[in-house]
Image (cartoon, rainbow, N blue to C red):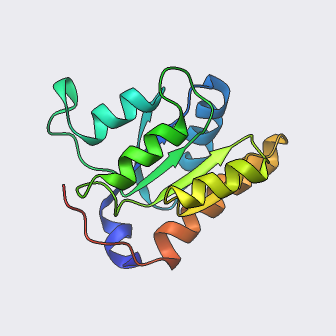
Amino acid sequence: MPNKLARHEVHVLLVDDDPGDVRLTIEALRESKLNIELSVARDGFEALARLRQEGHFAGRPMPDLILLDLNMPRKDGREALAEIKADPELRRIPVVILTTSQSEQDILASYNLGANCFITKPVDLGQFVQVVQSIEEFWFTVVKLPPSSG
C-alpha cells in the first residue's frame, strides 16, 4: 500500500469551519512525501454534498480519509459523521475526528457514531503540525485502507 500511495494522489477531505486550522492543516500536509490532494468543506452540509458528488461536486474523487471537526455551523460534525457512517457508499471511508473538544461525552459519542479515531487539536502551532503529520503517516503508510470506490 505505501508504494501505491507514493505513486498516486491521496485524497483527503478536511471538514472544518476555522480558517486558521484549515491553513495550518494545508501547511502541515505541504511537507508530505505523498502527493496529497486536500479538499475543504466548511460544514457538514458541504461535506456530504462533496461525498455524494452532488451539483458542482459531481465527478470529483472520493476521499481516502476524512478529517472532521465537531463544532461547525449548519450541520455539525456529529450529524455529518452519523450520515457518513449510515451510508453504505461512504461508511468505509475512515473518519478522523480532529477537534478542540476534550469532552468525554464527545469522545464517546464520536466512537458510537463510527469514528475511526478522535484527536484533540493542540493549541500549540508546532504540536498541531506534528499531529497532522502523524495522522498522515499513520493512515497512509501504516494502515491498509479499503479500495477506493470512486
Question: Percent position (x, y) of residue 135?
Answer: 60, 61
**The image quarter in which residue 93 lies:** bottom left
Question: Percent position (x, y) of residue 58?
Answer: 15, 34
On the picture, is 80 further left or further right than 16?
left
Count of numbered marks = 0
Closer to us: 69 or 137? 69
Closer to us: 4 or 148? 148
**Residue at 49% across, 20% down:** 74
**Residue at 78% across, 47% down:** 103
Instruction: Using the rendered image of the protein, determine whether residue 137 is visible from the camera's viewpoint.
Output: yes
**Residue at 19% across, 24% down:** 56
On the picture, is 109 further left or further right than 126?
left
- On screen, residue 105 above or below 26: below
**Residue at 44% across, 33% down:** 40
Question: Percent position (x, y) of residue 113?
Answer: 51, 55
Furthest-left residue in view? 59
Instruction: Using the rendered image of the protein, determine whether residue 11 is visible from the camera's viewpoint.
Output: no
Closer to us: 138 or 75? 75
On the picture, is 111 further left or further right than 106?
left
On the picture, is 9 further left or further right than 33?
left
Which quadrant would the C terminus be assigned to in this image? bottom left
Which quadrant would the N terminus be assigned to in this image? bottom left
Furthest-top residue in view? 74
Closer to us: 106 or 60? 106
- On screen, residue 62 above or below 52: below
- On screen, residue 84 above or below 77: below
